[in-house]
Image (cartoon, helix red, strand yellow):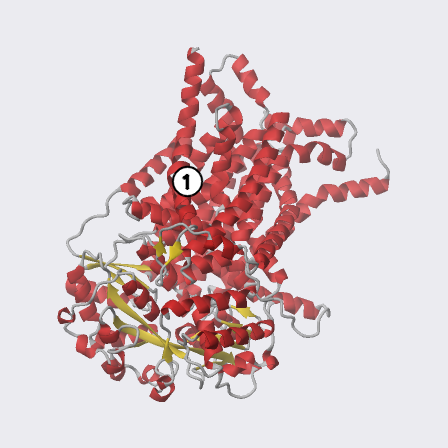
Amino acid sequence: MSGRPGWVTRRLVYGLPGWMTAMAYLFLLAPIVILVAFSFNEARSTVVFTGFTLDWYREVFADRNIARALRVSLIVAAASAGLATLIGALAAVAITRRRFPGRTLLATGLAAPLVLPEIVLGVGLLVFMSFSGIRLGYGSMIVGHVLVTIPFATLIIRAAAASLDPRIEDAAADLGADEWQTFTRVTLPQLAPAIFAAFLLSATLSFDNLVMSTFTSGVGTTTLPLRIYSMLKLGITPEINALGALMVVANIGIVLIVMGRYLPLMLNKPRPVEPERKN
Amino acid sequence: MTTRYKKSLLAATALALMPLGAAAQELNIFGWADEMPDEVLADFEAETGITVTFDTFDSNESMIARLEAGASGYDLVNPSQYAVQILAGRGLIAELDHSRIDTIGNIGESFTNVSYDPGNKYSIPYVWGTTGLAYNKSCVEGEITSWSALFDEKYAGRVYMLDNMLAAYIAGLQINGFSANSSNPDEIQKATETLIAQKPMLAGYNSTNFADLVSSGEACIVQSWSGSVLQAIETNPDVVYVLPEEGGTMWIDGYSILGDATNVDEAYQFLSYILRPEVAAKTTELTKIATSVLEARALLPEAIASNSAIYPSDETIANADFILDVGDAMKFYQDGWTQVKAAQ
Amino acid sequence: MRRSTRDAAVTSVMLAPAVLILVVFVVMPLCVVAAYSFAQRDAYGGVVPGFTLENYSQLFSGLYWQVFVNSFQLAAWTTILCLLIGYPVAYFIAFRAGRWGPALLVLMLVPFWINFLIRISAWVVLLGRNGLINGGLTAAGLTEAPVGLLGTLGATLVGMVYAFLPLCVFPIYAALQPLDRRLIEAGADLGAGPAETFLRVTLPLSLPGVLAAALFVFVPSMGVFAIPVLLGGGKDIILGNLIVQLFLEFRNIPLGAAVSVAMLGFAALGVVLYMRALSRIEAMR
């Protein structure tokens, strides 16, 4: 239709997101290669490479402290991300779909933990909890992590709910669906990717959290980052890289499972182009 | 998917709210990781039948913040010397009953009357080391023996100071010939000026990965804690740790019993246990950090007992000060350090 | 009548957990912090209750001005870079990746399951004098001797973008993903070029996500403390460093609380602006 130069520009513009994505993933994943390489380092260093060994993997499996800390971290990440996503999703949908007094205030409030330096919220929470006699442990830490992750969960789901077309819901109602049916059959499926994204991001942020954990952990609930930071005084060993490499493998496993779910669908539909997805 | 996910959520919440099983005998310790080997804890558990929970912190400061809030649930804590003063001053740790520690006589004489806690009233000194400097032979000419190397223009852009007020002032004060624990405002002011003048030639302040930086040659000279560079020295023969001729300082991490401890008997049993020479020797052998139990040194392999980064000679440590809590003079340090950090 | 009562009940049930957690665990602790900002400290760093404005007058004495400027600059650069990189990535995942989108999202988070310190030490290796980047520069003949990359603003920004990129991609993805493709197709059918379709249809529709992304990146950037120290040399401190220093190292909790309150006010402004923009966008639908 258009002339050749226009066609070239169009190809370039069309290709831009793809190229940028490739570069971004290279940027994000290149350091992982370094990390994994150092997990095989003979020396006790995460920066100077001397030779190959598998000893650090042996140590990871033998180290009962690391195992315990990993378990604590996983429990806290799963529970806090679940709670944050659930509470955040309910609030986000209410904020975008319903009218109630103090709507803006609540919306702002849910973003508040984000704008507070974590250490301030952590110290405040610690003082408040000990004042009200709450014993520090899993409960306090999960609450702390929910606070840290809930702004992300809420805002992600809210952004998605805001871009939904309300006419689809109206149409469902016109066709006789009650409110609950509309929600579960129309709204929720449309929001599912956002909820999934919110849960993933929350769990990840919780797993890597240090500051809030410092102030809310109790007896027997040392998380992995807490453990690793306290090893700093004597230097971190490639054992932590080995653990990281194992976590990467586990995560790639999740990726494969996610893909595994979609792969059969993709084989049935050789070209899943965008407009067809609506059906 | 959502219901299954809700169920697992409920399960996790229930798990979180469940009271932790109340075993007959337990002991909860809050300490530095890697300064107390797992083997020692396991031996103690096997011998006494007490279940030990060992949680870790990353700095004295965050540990104090946690304990300050009260009802931490811990019985024993593992503070460094100035933190002992703060915890005792805040009434968070209890006076020790020495008659309940049958091995107390094993503590080396030089550790029995430490200035931060005369007579070991509140704390049992356990592991110790020094604050000095580390350098990489491949990018430094000759031997370095003085703090002055940290201020030498020759190494501009290749020097890191510890990102810690008290540590930075050790160098700032001692290079001017003052005590590292000075409480004289004029001396502190002079040290502040020295540190501000030093800032433009520094690569930065770092108390986290400085050992890696000096080991990889990114930095030539770094101010350093002795324990932190041991690994780097082991990996890279070019890395050298020295206690500077101006003195440097000593640090001690000891054990104190918390004022609200519930397992006091078990805590005393633990203190008695770790002060046995063979246990202390095992600690040093596995962590490469010296303990306050002098007899332990004779039980150690030659390579460790004669390693000067672990056991510096008596003459070198004679000059070293302890870093103490300077009380009211702290204000001058803090104002000075804020000026240093804000300087361009 | 009955319908509206039920409606109100449903709304309350949906909001109750959020309100509860906010009031109990955010508002109350914040009151503690606010009260502390008017208190004094004793010699051992304990908080002495009382009322003084000394902390605030100290805060605005000029010594801390540079800290505010540093924080703002770092946060602004980080946000701009993250949006420039993050938008195309989110666009690709939402529109072009098809069924692979969720997998790409998980992949984006993979690095974050490795401890932060280890991730940063990988950048120390990459950016170091003997690192890959210096090696590449020397091999390409761009530099003769290794350049000190660590301890510069550039190194800090690499670390910041590395840390915040997913926080930027996720909300934009969440806003783009449910967009009606037919609207976009319609733009194309009406003869608009891809650039025009994007600027007049896609971008405005995804603005809520872009705003959320900017907020996610900008505000927490000011409170970061480890990255400027580990990669940037820690010579220019930002608000995050100042607060950690005051709370933990100096044990001057009242002054730390005052800095926090100031930062809170500063950041609340950002949230209010964001909320207002978002409501306006929502109202336009």
**Image height of B22 relative to A82, above or below:** below
In the image, taking residue A235 as reference, residue C237 lies left or right, namely right
**Image height of B315 relative to A92, above or below:** below
- Observer-nearest residue: A53 or C75? C75
Label 1 sits on a secondary structure element that is helix
- Observer-nearest residue: C64 or C21? C64
**Image location of residue B14, percent across then percent down:** 29, 39
Q: Examine the rendering and report whether any part of residue A230 can be seen.
A: yes
Quadrant location of the N terminus of chain A? top right
**Image location of residue C201, percent across then percent down:** 70, 31
| Residue at position x 61%, y 66% in the image | B344
**Image location of residue B242, percent across then percent down:** 44, 82
- Observer-nearest residue: C202 or C242? C242
**Image location of residue C225, percent across then percent down:** 51, 57
Q: Indicate the quadrant where residue A33 lies.
A: bottom right
| Chain of the residue under label 1 | C
Q: Indicate the quadrant where residue A147 lies.
A: top left
Quadrant location of the C terminus of chain A? top right
**Image height of B172 relative to A200, above or below:** below
Q: How many marks?
A: 1
Q: Examine the rendering and report whether any part of residue C173 can be seen.
A: no
Within 10 Å of disc 1 (Cα), the crowding (few <14, some 14-19, many 20+) is: some
Q: Which residue is mark 1?
A: C27
The residue sitting at the right extreme is: A3
| Residue at position x 18%, y 75% in the image | B104
Residue type of the residue flagged with mark 1: Val
| Residue at position x 44%, y 24% in the image | C11
| Residue at position x 43%, y 29% in the image | C15
